[in-house]
Amino acid sequence: MFHTIESAIEWIESVKRFGDKLDLSRMELACKILGNPEKKLPVIHIGGTNGKGSTVSYLKHILLEQGYNVGTFTSPYIVRFNERITYNYNDISNEELLYYINKVKELSEKVFDAHGQVITFFELITLISFLFFTDMDVDYIIYEVGLGGRLDATNVVAPMITGITTIGYDHMGVLGDTLPAIAKEKLGIVKQGVPLCTTVNNEDLMPIFEQYTKLHNSSFFKVNTDDIKVKEYGTITSFVYKNELYKISMMGNHQPNNASLAIEIIHQLNAMHLSRVSLESIKVGLINTYWPGRMERFGNVILDGAHNVEAALVLKESMETYFKDHTIKVLYTSMADKEYYDIIKIIEKFAHEIYFTSFDYARCETAENLFQVSDFGKKYLRENAIDALHELKHLKKKEILLVTGSLYFISYIRKAL
């Protein structure tokens, strides 16, 4: 039994990330021992390659504005471990987290002793959320898929509605190396008779979406890009979705899409009489939404966790939209298992200077290797990320420092800011 939150988190973070086989057998076994709490929770399940966290946050703030009690489960964390699990406006407290870590520690020992199975890190966090939300007075819990969908630990839930944001290339060693293969993994969160909303607009993938939802007798609602018309990008971005004007304060060309998906999910919940959310609550909730590490601004420093090609392309569009008349300096690192060659080539198209760095994290690629990949004219090597930040953050009025490449890196840099 752990007596301090520090020792409890140290233990859970030491547990291996992935099981010997990627399936739901350990989760199903653990949930059965617990009495299947996951089947009784009022879940909205959000998957996709990019934009999941923002969509979760839009939904959360809309539902909170209406007066509902709302839980969220997201990953990874940016500021502190506790933010993976929230209730209304608060992260799970240290006292609560310590209590539930001790619960799942006991459970994991029981599963190992009886079945020889090791419950993984992400599975343990997911189980903690089931126990926590079972004990709370929740109207809705919004679950963000961790990896893929079909075999993700969160996919034991019985959702009232599902959402898929985008389909792009990421985690290809696990999910497949074609968009149809990745789409099928993401679509694994669709359940029998449960509606799906999506902002995926790739026409080549639509037959797969239609076939999968038909097979599961699931209503399918596609948010068409033609229905989203951006009026103005800025500190406040205004856009029209289905002839209604909305405003958001989160930066990024992709945010009207994420917000529109949240709007559509709320519309469908209302239509099924599973919620009663007013247009006013939708509008106020959207403009109040905030999500750290996604085009997040600290003066002239921008933090964005773009870690795959699709996210890098959106980041390029956003930087060219918001800062087209600025000098852009980029502080970049990447996890070694990401497609950093292609990402660097995208960054080279809009950056004026690129500083390659690394930080103390097991999966991080070396600054030297990243530097060598680039043939950019103004590229620089900075081994120490914090020293580089202190060097570069003194900016002139028309200069921007963009820190990007990984959400883990953003978390590390954000603390220093």
Image (cartoon, helix red, strand yellow):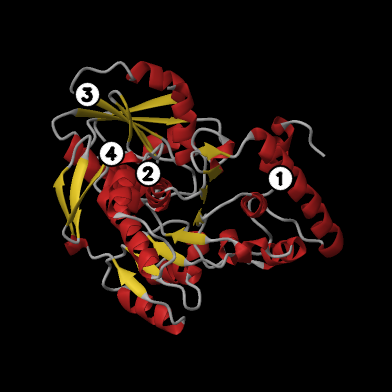
As displayed, is residue 2 above or below residue 170?
above
| C-alpha separation, residue under disc 2 versus residue under disc 3 | 20 Å
Q: What element carries label 2?
A: loop
Q: How many residues crowd mark 2 within 10 Å: few (<14), some (14–19), many (20+)?
A: many
Instruction: State the residue at coordinates (40%, 52%).
Output: 59
Q: Name the residue under label 4.
A: 249
Q: Which mark is residue 100?
A: 1
In 3D space, how far apart are the residues under numbered discs 4 and 3 (Cα atoms)?
22 Å
In the picture, measured across the screen, residue 397 lies left or right of residue 366, that is: left
Give x and y (percent) for residue 9: 68, 37
Secondary structure of the residue carrying numbered label 3: strand
- Specify the amino acid type for callout 4: Ser
Q: Which amino acid does label 3 sit on?
A: Glu
Tell me the distance, in whole angstroms, between the alpha carbons under discs 3 and 1: 46 Å
Quick one: quadrant of the C terminus? Answer: top left
User: Which label lies toward us, 3 or 1?
Assistant: 1
Q: Which mark sits nearer the N-terminus, 4 or 1?
A: 1
Tell me if mark 1 has few (under 14), some (14-19) or many (20+) residues whose alpha carbon lies within 10 angstroms of its own: many
